[in-house]
Image (cartoon, rainbow, N blue to C red):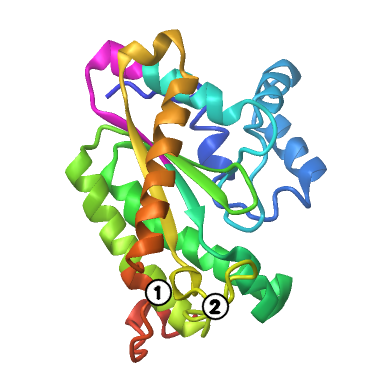
Amino acid sequence: MRRFRHRLKNTIFEALAGRQQFVDYYKKAIEEIVALGITQEQMAVLKKYGLLAADNVTGFYEGRSGEGRYQTLVQAIQHVKQTGEEAYYVEMDLQNLGGINAVLGHTGANEIYTKIAEVIKMNLQPIASESAFFRHGGDEMSAILVDTNERALVMGFEKVKSQVGEVARHFNVHNAPHPKHANDDAYKGTGVHYGYARITPQHEANPSLVFKEADTKLEMNKRKLSVNRNTTMQAEPYAPSARLANA
């Protein structure tokens, strides 16, 4: 299959994937990239699009600055146009980050955020031939998934929902009150809200419509959950799975 991401993927994307301390050692990392044979001109292009930085909490690509998320979407649209493969953009919100901060403090909240990001990537990356994950806001994440289908995406999020519930109970924040809705059970705990949009060749004229479509579905899902409490927030007896036993 033809890869949709930057042609330097094998030397940049894979070399830096998962390096959560990249931001702290930015200068040293650039020196290492140069040692790999990447030119200053090529680095300048990657820096422009925000593809040389990884968020140090989630490990996802930095989407809060630069054009990395947008340009990766543009590449995905072109890929779909050329190959006819099915691809999706997924918008995600981490519920009640402020409430978790209030209970555990900033460091503790970051630890949970890291675990949840790992759950997301562990369940969504395998369903696609190509994937790119971004953190583009304080509690906002996104993913571009190529060569997958809607059923696999929905099933993947069912696993995410269940496993994030385990994380919440493991850290005892499954009933953490929301700072703005302290008396409303619908807002307690944490979880991952999501909405998605299929990427089509028609989006070539206005790629930003993909973001808008996914965000609209995300907000619709959040409104539904305010009426029917997300099952990941239910206070169930905690029985840690093997993967969380050593968390």
At mark 1, the secondary structure is: helix
- Which residue matches tag 2? 183
Tell me: residue 56, above or below residue 14.
below
Report the span colored magenta: 79-90
11 in relation to 184, above or below: above
Q: Position of residue 159 (x, y in %)?
A: 28, 63
Where residue 180 sits, quadrant-wise, is bottom right
Q: Is residue 78 visible?
A: no
The structure residue drawn at horizontal position 37% and vertical position 60%, both measured from the top left corner, is: 225
Which mark, by number, is residue 233? 1
Q: Say which label, 1 or 2, has the lower sequence index.
A: 2
Residue 162, percent from left and from top: 31, 70
For the residue carrying disc 2, how many other residues have a C-alpha within 10 Å: few (<14), some (14-19), or many (20+)?
few
Q: Identify which residue is drawn at 48% across, 64% down.
A: 116
Residue 65 showing in the rendered view: yes
Task: Give me the C-alpha separation between circle 1 and circle 2.
Answer: 15 Å
- Report crowding for label 1: few under 14, some 14 to 19, many 20 or more residues within 10 A (C-alpha): many
